[in-house]
Image: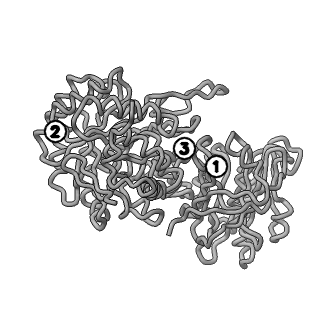
Amino acid sequence: MNLSVNVGKLKLGNPVIAASGTFGYGEEYSGFTDIGRLGAVTVKGLSLSPREGNPPPRIVETPAGMLNAVGLQNIGIDSFIKDKLPFLRQFETRVIVNFFGDSISEYAEAAARLSSAEGVHALEMNISCPNKQAGWSIFGTDPKVTFRVVSAVRKATAMPLIVKLSPNVTDIAMMAKAAEDAGADALSLINTLTAMAIDINTRRPKLANITGGLSGPAIRPVAVRMVWECYRKVKIPLIGMGGIMSAEDAIEFMLAGATAVAVGTANFVNPGAAVDILQGIKTFMSARGIRSPRELTGAVRC
Amino acid sequence: MSRLFEASVKENRRLTEKHYLLTFNPLKKIRRPGPGNFFMISAGNGLDPLLKRPFSLHRRTGSGIRILYRVTGRGTAILSRKRPGDVLEIIGPLGNGFPARRAGENTILVAGGVGIAPVFALAEHLAASAKKPVLFYGAKTGSDLLCIDELKSIGIEPRICTDTGDTGRKGPVTGMLREFLGKNPSFSEDCCIYACGPESMLRSLSALAGEYGLRGYAALEQNMACGIGACLGCIVNTTRGYKRVCRDGPVFPLNEIIW
């Protein structure tokens, strides 16, 4: 059995990735799981300057899921390269850096700066955070703007470029096409769904930010559907994510069209979840004589 | 390597209408928890509720590790129905814990409501020392006061107050502490406060400590998803910026917390 997969130009030892925003900068999980066994780690979204993020409360649990409104808190690209990247370089695991900007030029500058850092293997462009102010969301919801911002980043970096799509659109396949046309090497989908929860006693929103992003198994069927829609529309590889809690969930995403999968909220429930899921995928494949994860990608029978 | 483990419920005793004392035995060797450390404990075994809940160490005994908790929502309601022999999935021990006491200094412990849970762990740790801690304990009513006999059994006579005045003094715990500090100026000369309780209590305690120039620490509580510093969900605003209650805390210097 060969577990390696190619996500465009990015070669992974296996198809299991830790999703951005759920795995810190990797070191948080040291002592809790074997990071070196993962195909890749996608670090918490970075910007040119550090961000403080939103005030608390930032998270609330909902049925089979959670809302978060962290607000892209991060230490900034320079601190990441200096203080966090050396830790990640010790592993075979590939390092995908999630990043964002507040303007097209910031996106391009961030990409350029990350591209020269030793130990970064791919960039994941976040154009889909639901916790940014109104106006920012057009990067991920207006296909013309998506095309422009991805094109600008494409010119700024030769690295494998993954674009993370928002599910908060009417037609995600159209957004996928815009990113592909602009030069993306791969797509990550989905980011969280914009959501809200209210305390009926105080009549106040449960999050200080009022709205947040819904993640966890509650969103999985939505995410599977979106991966399937994008798989039929674009040629570039897809990284499927959204509520993956088990190997069975991961395989469902692959059948829908994902080349690799990312484990997110499950890391919070069990820090060893991603490694357990990888083990489960191996067991599933060997029991059925499947020699490569590629045999599963898009193999749903409709 | 992993701090994820399974534990068997030894006892889940109801103390009051809302409070329970749960003893568990880890099914594998775990790190030794100290006062102010906490555990993330699964409420159910399925996907709903999804996240583990944080509970601080209450007591380490020969029969297992104890947590003391109040039923406040679905997760704790499910936990309250666990029976001896049930298996819990747990991560821990986590968090920084209360800092070690400086040599020779006096100790004031302050607990509000179920905040006695970690304060008790520290009281037990310090009870055997030459300088016995002085413990102030406030609750809404007398029936909300927990482990009074347990405190007495470790040689601590708690100074009690309640909002209703049905047991102990009437009024906030900080009022009783203020009076004590006024009457015992030499005690407060070299003294440190360790506290856990509702935000309103900790806020006025911070003000009081500032007024008397006392050092102090508070164990904080926040909603957490991971408990290990990754989700950035449980932040508290401090003079050093936003900090994670789970990883940078849960114990913070009183004078660093911005209320």
Under circle 1, the secondary element is loop
Residue at the extreme right: B166
Residue found 29% across the figure and 56% down from its top:
A4
Residue B215 sits in quarter = bottom right
Crowd around label 1: few <14 · some 14–19 · many ≥20 (10 Å): few
The answer to whether mark 1 and mark 2 are in CB contact below 8 A is no
Please provide percent x and percent y for residue A281. Answer: 43, 53
Total marks placed: 3
* Observer-nearest of A154 and A39: A39
- What residue is pinned by disc 3? B259
Are the residues at dot 1 and dot 3 in contact (C-beta closer than 8 Å)? no
Write down the residue under mark 1: B45
In the figure, B102 relative to A144: above or below?
A: below
- In the image, what residue occupies the spot 83% across and 45% down? B170
A218 on left or right of A106 = right
Figure quadrant of residue B133: bottom right
Structural crowding at the residue carrying mark 3, measured as other residues with C-alpha within 10 Å and reported as few (<14), some (14–19) or many (≥20): few
Judge whether residue A132 can be spotted in this image. no
Q: Which residue has dot 2 on it?
A: A153
Which three-letter amino acid code belongs to the residue tagged 1? Answer: Asn
Query: Which residue ends up furthest to the left in the rendered image?
Result: A155
- Classify residue B130 as left or right of residue B31: right
Residue situated furthest front in the rendering: A289
What separation in Å lies between label 1 and label 2 (alpha carbons)?
Answer: 44 Å
How far across and down, in percent of the image, does residue A211 sit? 47, 29
Q: Is residue B151 left or right of residue B58?
A: right
Circle 2 sits in a helix, a strand or a loop, which is it?
helix
Mark 1 and mark 3: Cα distance apart in space: 36 Å
Q: Residue at x 62, y 57 (%)?
A: B89
Colouring rule applied to residues: one colour
Q: Nearer the viewer, mark 2 or mark 3?
A: 2
> In the image, residue B40 lies at what x, y percent?
60, 55
